[in-house]
Amino acid sequence: MPLERRRKTVDSTCNCYTCRNFSAAYLHHLFALKIIAYTLATLHNLTFMHNFMVRIRDSISRDGFNSFKDTFLADYQIRTSLFV
């Protein structure tokens, strides 16, 4: 596996403890061996959902939810395809 892929975070746009401190490769290693991997994944998922809901509420208050939705889905599909 190339070095740059080993250093890649789960989500480069996320500011949670997990994404700031651990690479995707290290998390993969932890899932095979350690229960802490589930705690780190939960931290990331909760942060992702919190930030997602903040962005949704903001887009609704600006009357721009449809634009936000289209942009989010296009970006999310590109980012998630990198891990397949």
Image (tube, helix red, strand yellow):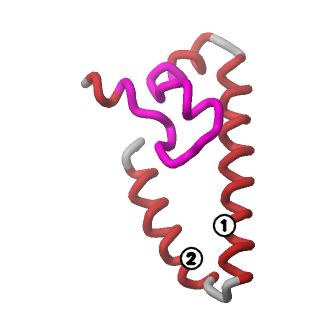
State the separation of the CA atoms marked 2 and 1: 8 Å
Chain-order first, disc 2 or disc 1: 1
Q: Quadrant of residue 36?
A: top right
* Figure disc tally: 2
Q: Determine whether 71 is above or below 37 in the image.
A: below
Q: Determine whether 8 is above or below 78 in the image.
A: above
As helix, strand or loop, the secondary structure at mark 1 comes to helix
Which disc is residue 35 wearing? none
Which stretch did the figure color magenta?
Answer: 6-28
Please state if 62 lies on the left or on the right of 1 as rendered: right
User: Could you tell me if the residues under marks 2 and 1 are in contact, i.e. CB atoms within 8 Å?
Assistant: yes
Residue 1 in percent (x, y) is at 28, 22
| Residue shown at the point (73%, 63%) measured from the top left | 53
Residue 35 in percent (x, y) is at 71, 16
Which disc is residue 55 wearing? 1
As helix, strand or loop, the secondary structure at mark 2 comes to helix
Q: Quadrant of residue 27?
A: top right
| Residue shown at the point (64%, 31%) measured from the top left | 17
Residue 17 part of the magenta-drawn span = yes
Which residue corresponds to mark 2? 68
The C terminus is located in which quarter? top left
Residue 15 in percent (x, y) is at 60, 42
Front residue of 27/14: it is: 14
Residue 45 in percent (x, y) is at 68, 43
Name the amino acid type tagged 2. Phe
Name the amino acid type tagged 1. Arg
Q: Determine whether 17 is above or below 64 in the image.
A: above
Front residue of 41/47: it is: 47
